[in-house]
Image: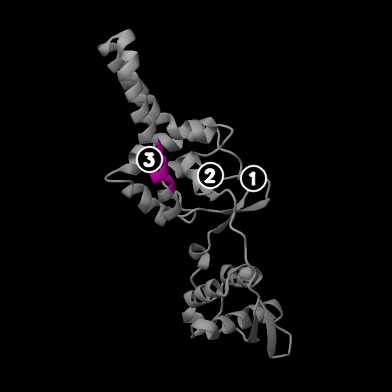
Amino acid sequence: MAAPTRLDTLQPVELADGVEIKLRVAGPAVRSTAWLIDLLIFCAGVFALLLFLNLFVAQWIGFEMSQGFTALVLFVSVWFYNVFFEASRWGRTPGQKAMKIRVVSLTGGPVTVSQAVLRNFLRVIDFMPFMYLTGFLACLFTRRFQRLGDLVAGTVMVYADPPPVTLNQTQIHAERRAPPVVLTREEQAALLQFIERAPHWSDERRVELANVVEPLTQSIGHEGLSRLCGMALWLQEPEKKDSFTRLKV
């Protein structure tokens, strides 16, 4: 049975002391939007700065000195724009703030200066060969949507203010049934986690996740969801005799 974790952005992280925390990771779409906002802000800031240097500062220190100073300012700005904001007390760039996301370490805490430097300096590799193609592919193939810079620095992009969860409880007429095949311990744990967390998802998301295991339920849509809930109930109490249960999820 395929694990549905790729469709759920709530990712568990086990800390060194055994405590498990859950991070609501941000996907490539929201990260790309934040990057575009930062790019616009950066370009506007650099344009204003260059205008100031060429119109005013060049008259005091000379044109050649002004050009050298401009190159130095551009170098520092390009490499340390994200580092400055992510390692500061704000903890996120203006674009990330606009999209309500932030970078944190894998422990859920704020990033250190060394982590901010490492993840942002590796943008050069994530950018290659064209417009963050490497970083985008890395995000798609990692469970926590991490680009290479995140993987090396041990960071992850999460929602700073998780969207409110709308509880859309519905009653499902589930028939308690044993799975048609023997499930591994991991698959049983995934099924039990599904029924535990299902009340926190919309009805559409529950059906979407149930459709993933269509080979197990032999059905899709609400019928597949009902069968999946019935198997989870059987795993919880395999000895119970009643066959039908109205389950609130």
Name the residue: 39% across, 37% down: 122
Q: In which quarter of the image is residue 247?
A: bottom right
Does the magenta segment cover residue 179? no
Side of 195 relative to 97 (left or right) = right
- Percent across and percent down for residue 82 are 45, 35
Q: Which residue position is annotated with label 1?
A: 16
- Percent across and percent down for residue 198 are 62, 71
Q: In which quarter of the image is residue 149?
A: top left
Note whether 155 is above or below 208 in the view shown. Answer: above
Q: Earlier in the sequence, mark 2 or mark 3?
A: 3
Name the residue: 32% across, 8% down: 61
Q: Earlier in the sequence, mark 2 or mark 1?
A: 1
State the residue in front, 170 or 206. 170
Chosen colour scheme: one colour
**Residue 6 in sight from this viewpoint:** yes
Q: Which of marks 1 and 3 is nearer the N terminus?
A: 1
Side of 32 relative to 200 (left or right) = left
Does the magenta segment cover residue 35? yes
Side of 77 relative to 248 (left or right) = left
Label 3's element?
helix
State the residue in front, 223 or 191. 223
**Mark 2 Cα shell of 10 Å, populated few (<14), some (14-19), many (≥20):** many
Tag nearer the camera, 1 or 3: 3
Q: Which residue position is annotated with label 2?
A: 102
Label 1's element?
loop
Type of amino acid at the residue the image marks with label 1 = Ala
Type of amino acid at the residue the image marks with label 2 = Arg
**Residue 115 in sight from this viewpoint:** no
Type of amino acid at the residue the image marks with label 3 = Leu
Tag nearer the camera, 2 or 1: 2
**Mark 3 Cα shell of 10 Å, populated few (<14), some (14-19), many (≥20):** few
Q: Which residue position is annotated with label 3?
A: 40
